[in-house]
Image (cartoon, coloured by chain):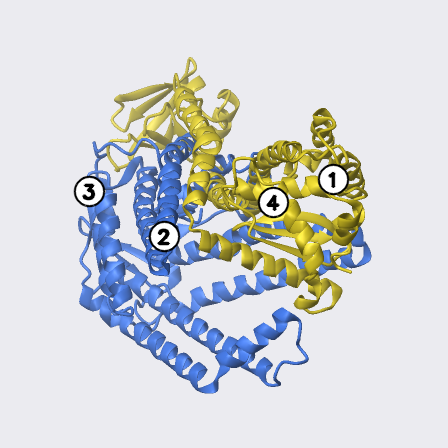
Amino acid sequence: MSSDTGSVPVVDGREGGKSRGGEVGNGSDIFFEVSLKNLLIRLIKNKIFGLLTFGIYRFWGKTHIRRQLWQGVRIGGDSLEYRGTAKELFIGFLIAMIILVPILLVSSLVIQILSFATGNPAVNAIGQLAYFVLLYGFWQFARYRLWRYRLSRTAWRGIRFYLSGSAIRYALNVLLRSFVALVTLGWAYPWLQAYRLNYQLNNTHFGDGQFTYSGSTGDLYRLYWPAILIAQLVAVAAMVFVATSGAIDLSMEALMAAETGQVKTAKSGSGEGVVKLVLAGVILFATMTIFSFVTRIWEFRYLVGKTTFNGARFSSRLSVRSVLLIFAVMMGLMLVSLLVVGGFFGAIIYWQKAAAVVLPFVLFIFLLIGMDILYTLFLLVPIVRKICETTEIENLDVFEETAASSVNSPKYGEGFADAMDVGAF
Amino acid sequence: MAVAARLFDGKAAKARDVFLTLADGQLFIHDTEGALLGDWPVSELYDENRPTRDDELNLSLDHEDARLIITDVAFIDVLRRLCPHLHKRRGGPAGWWKPYLYWGGGAVVAVIVIFTVVLPLLAWQIAYLIPTETQAQIGQETRDIFIKAIAREDGTKAEAVVCRNPAAEAVLERLVTALAAADGEENPVRKITVVKTKQANAFALPGGQLMIFSGLFDISDHPNGFSAVLAHEIAHADHNHPMRLFVTNAGVATIFSLLLGDVSGGTLLATLGQMTVGSGYSRDFEREADRSAIERMQAAGYDISPMVPLMEKLAKQTPSSGFLSFLDSHPGFDERIETLRAAGKTGGAALSDEDWTTLRGYCG
């Protein structure tokens, strides 16, 4: 593919003239094939054992799921293999607990002591901020370690991947750039993204070979500016709207009235204020979500196109429409299942009042399990499948010349990440 | 019979075309030139595919990276019959359990130390450091929430449920002074709010706030029963228990959410855990307050034994939580009554009949 494809947000599906049928079986194909039935059985088992063991089983559960998902990815006819063990995850978690719990506990409490001892709300705010920064930094650190662990446990054709680089350096840089992005109201965000992609991709190895990412910050700006601009315009519009319509005053009144139970005495029109405020919020949120979503997909196509491996080139035709469709289906399924399950339990409680004590708990667990299963089967799997289908590799043969690397892989993985809920599966 | 297969030796990504033969419980691997690349004992073969595939075996020999990919369906059947644990999981290497033991033990010790030593100590220290004004504010806000909730229940305004009665207030104040610790209070009671409601309850809030639900007057047959409850709450306030509990709960919540990770129902389990551990701390506080109440009553020359029938009444009103009793914030009634009985008769009446009548008429 030409080197500048993807630097312009091409509306999907137009580039690449190959027909789908022509690609299948030509040896440079990636596809994803996983048995939903096996996955479902495994997910249900994981949930049950997870509850029975107070969550300790999650390390074994995760490992089983990953083996299935990894094996489902076939590149050039050969499956990926997940070689991590639950033991590594569990020990990693224990190590993180021994280190993380005291650090978080002490730092959160020190911040509280400081802010309370001075009794100054400004100190309190700074303390909260410092704690948040600490958590955010940890989170980035954990994310990098998680990637390193997963890559080092991923093998293809008997050779493992690996992620070099320093997780601390990565976390500090991301922290710094996130701060700048925040101060510039999002305008430095592409700069932050450029760093992340650069650092992560250029440090990714397969055996003794290394991936190269040649994207530029300028190109990312070209992808991101509409989203940033529109998010800000919508934010400003919403603020102006709220300020001029007096929606805040009215909704505050409505809230106060609701709180004191004096709905009747509240000024008429305050209900309208709440509606306006909610509406403004929904519009703001929806616009930002859709634009960041679309930009993400553009960015993904861009980064795939800018990544090479010893002469092998990659390209992605992932379309905004197909991903949006998957999301829409997922949302619909979630809504329907919520209504069905909620209605079912609601009916039971209505007819059998005594059940109201226990049922909410059952309902809660049921929904949590259900949502997770829906998420995996109808969002994660379809998206991975779509990504695989739309990715092409040119010169796949060069991978055959790769030898195993002598770099040591991390002994225990993901502890920090697990404790902080980084990573979806 | 030689079967074609592909070998990934774990050293290079290039597949080697190989031919397999079975003999003497060994799987012999030859390359296309006929050179022997390896002989894998059939008893040591494991299929690494999860889930298993009907049309492919991904064989491993040991914990190393080499893989043998077999797609010949007939040969797969032969191997399935020959290999005893083809689709089972390979056992760990020798001494696999040691890291579990060391790190698991370390984590258990760390968690125990945090819950039993670090957290209570920190909570005490922080509660001590929070300025009086902040504590008073937290207490004030909590009090207002209670008043509002009761007012809503009765369908009246907040001001209507707060009782004002100068004569009764004076009696109550005298009683509080009499029940003060002999060596003075570290955190004195600053404000007592009496609320008109059928519920019988009394509790201490941060910042020296006490709340009394007027049902407590109705249920107390003897002034000393009420006085003992008051002494118990004063003790809570003096030891700054409400604030310490507040901080402890925040800490416990942090730890549990870290421990449980993203397990389904994790929030639920975390809340349950927090209630269990948190109420454990609070039970300790209750015991401390009970002990202190006995001492205070004794020092003031009041008899605590009328609290026993009061407790028994309360016990009847409160449904037993049965197997959920580990969640109770108070020790069991039986245990508390036992403690009170052990104290015996500790003095005389706390209030004259006249004063007791005045106090019981606090809310009219």
The image shows residue B168, relative to residue B312, as above or below, that is below
Question: As shown in the figure, which amino acid type bears the numbered disc 1?
Answer: Asn
User: Please, what secondary structure does the residue beneath circle 1 have?
Assistant: helix
Please name the color used to draw chain A: blue
* Image mark 2: chain: A
Q: Are marks 1 and 4 in contact (CB under 8 Å)?
A: no
Q: Count residues near mark 2 (Cα–Cα under 10 Å), then give few for <14, some for 14-19, many for 20+.
A: many
Question: Which of the two discs, 2 and 1, sits closer to the camera?
Answer: 1
Q: Spatial distance from mark 1 to mark 4, Cα to Cα?
A: 15 Å
Q: Nearer the viewer, mark 4 or mark 2?
A: 4
Q: CA distance from mark 2 to mark 1?
A: 42 Å
Q: Position of residue A124 (x, y in %)?
A: 36, 56
Decide if residue A340 is on the left or right side of residue A193: right
State the mark number for residue A173.
none
Please determine if labels 3 and 4 lie on a single subunit. Answer: no
Numbered mark located on residue B177 in the image: 4
Callout 3: SS: strand
Task: Quote the CA–CA distance across marks 4 and 2.
Answer: 34 Å
Instruction: Output the chain of dot 4.
Output: B
Q: Which residue is mark 1?
A: B224
State whether residue A204 appears in this view: no
Q: Position of residue A287 (x, y in %)?
A: 42, 74
Q: Residue at x 34, y 60 (%)?
A: A122
Read off the residue under disc 3: A209
Please, what secondary structure does the residue beneath circle 2 have?
A: helix
| For discs 1 and 4, the disc positioned in front in the rendered view | 4
